[in-house]
Structure formats: C-alpha cells, structure tokens
Image (cartoon, rainbow, N blue to C red):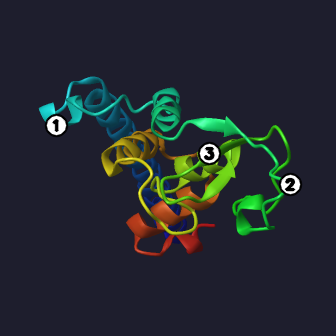
Amino acid sequence: MAAVTQILSHLYTISTVFLTLLLLELLISFRTLFKFLSSTTPSSSSTALLPPASSAAFFNLIESKVPSTLYKLRPLAPDSSESSCSVCLSKFEEGDQIRRLKCKHTFHKDCLDRWLEQEFATCPLCRREVLPREAAGRLRVRREATQEYDGSDEELIFLLSALQGNNLHRLL
C-alpha cells in the first residue's frame, strides 16, 4: 500500500513538472507570436514619421547628421584633448575617419558609431543629444523586441522555481 502511495506521489510530481514545462513553452510561443505580429503590423501615425528602425537606417541617419571626415594633423596646434578618442583612448592618426559632434567633441567614426548604437545617441563625454531620441529609441525597441528566451538552463530553472514556489530544488 505504501508503494502505491509513493508511486502516485512520484507520478503527481512528474506530471506537475511536465505540465509546468508545457505551460512555459506555450507562454514563450505566444509571446514570440505576439511580438512577431505586432512588429509586422503598422503602428500609430507618429511612428510612421520616424526613420526605419534597422541598423543600416540608423547608421545612415548618423552619417547624415554627423558626417565623418578624415583626420589631418595640425603641426602648429598645441597638444589638446582633441588629439585622442575618448572612447578607445588612442590617438588620432593621419587619415583616420573621425566624427566631430556639435558639442565640439571628436571621436573615431567606428568608436562613436558603436557608442551611439549601444547608448541613447548622446555624446560619450557631455551627454548632449547627437540624434533625436525617437530615432535611437526605435532601434532600441526593435532590438529589445527581438530578444527572447535564450534556452539557457539557468533561466529555465529560475522560471520554473518561480512557478513552483521555490520547491523545484527538491526535484533537482
């Protein structure tokens, strides 16, 4: 009789874990489907006026607002902070592609492009806006919308333990 009770107890635990995993998979699938459908349907008219949210369009916008130039050494100019890039901390060399912002700060083109892509489109030194917030925000929203469950065991254990009320550690 005790053996039957023990088997039923294990069967209950296994079915609970299975149903929880199934529910989690369904939630992830619905979330992915919802994000896909919401990203393909046209949104409000205010976002239609904004530039496309692709990385290529973002870099084209940067190039139009802050065009890159070639760095030229000025032999008579005193050594200043403008002789090095504050992002990578290396000195500018003749022929380097640079961008000079409206705030008069100068950076390597690639360094500033990576910074603007990662941050909120502000100068790395003074935080003055380089691009409109809407343009940078659209790229960030698009990037965050494409992120989903990465399939890691740690995240799955965390999600399951939250669903099970932290009793999952007994099963592992």
Residue contact at pointers 1 and 2, CB within 8 angstroms: no
User: What residue would you read off at disc 1?
Assistant: 46
- Residue depth check, mark 1 versus mark 2: number of the one nearer the observer: 2
- In terms of sequence position, does the residue under pointer 1 or pointer 3 come before the other? 1
User: What residue would you read off at disc 2?
Assistant: 75
At label 1, the amino acid type is: Ser
**Residue positioned 23% across, 24% down in the render:** 41
Secondary-structure class at tag 3 = strand
Q: Nearer the viewer, residue 146 or 49?
A: 49
Q: Position of residue 70 (x, y in %)?
A: 73, 37
Secondary-structure class at tag 1 = helix
User: What residue would you read off at disc 3?
Assistant: 99
56 to the left or right of 110: left
- In terms of sequence position, does the residue under pointer 1 or pointer 2 come before the other? 1
Q: Position of residue 142 (x, y in %)?
A: 40, 39
Q: Is residue 17 above or below residue 167?
A: above
- In terms of sequence position, does the residue under pointer 3 or pointer 2 come before the other? 2
At label 2, the amino acid type is: Pro
**Residue positioned 28% across, 27% down in the render:** 37
130 to the left or right of 33: right
Q: Residues within 10 Å of mark 2 (few under 14, many from 20)?
A: few
CA separation, marks 1 and 3? 30 Å
Secondary-structure class at tag 2 = loop
**Residue positioned 41% across, 53% down in the render:** 20
Q: Which mark is residue 142?
A: none
Q: Nearer the viewer, residue 103 or 137?
A: 103
- Residue depth check, mark 1 versus mark 3: number of the one nearer the observer: 3
Residue contact at pointers 1 and 3, CB within 8 angstroms: no
At label 3, the amino acid type is: Arg
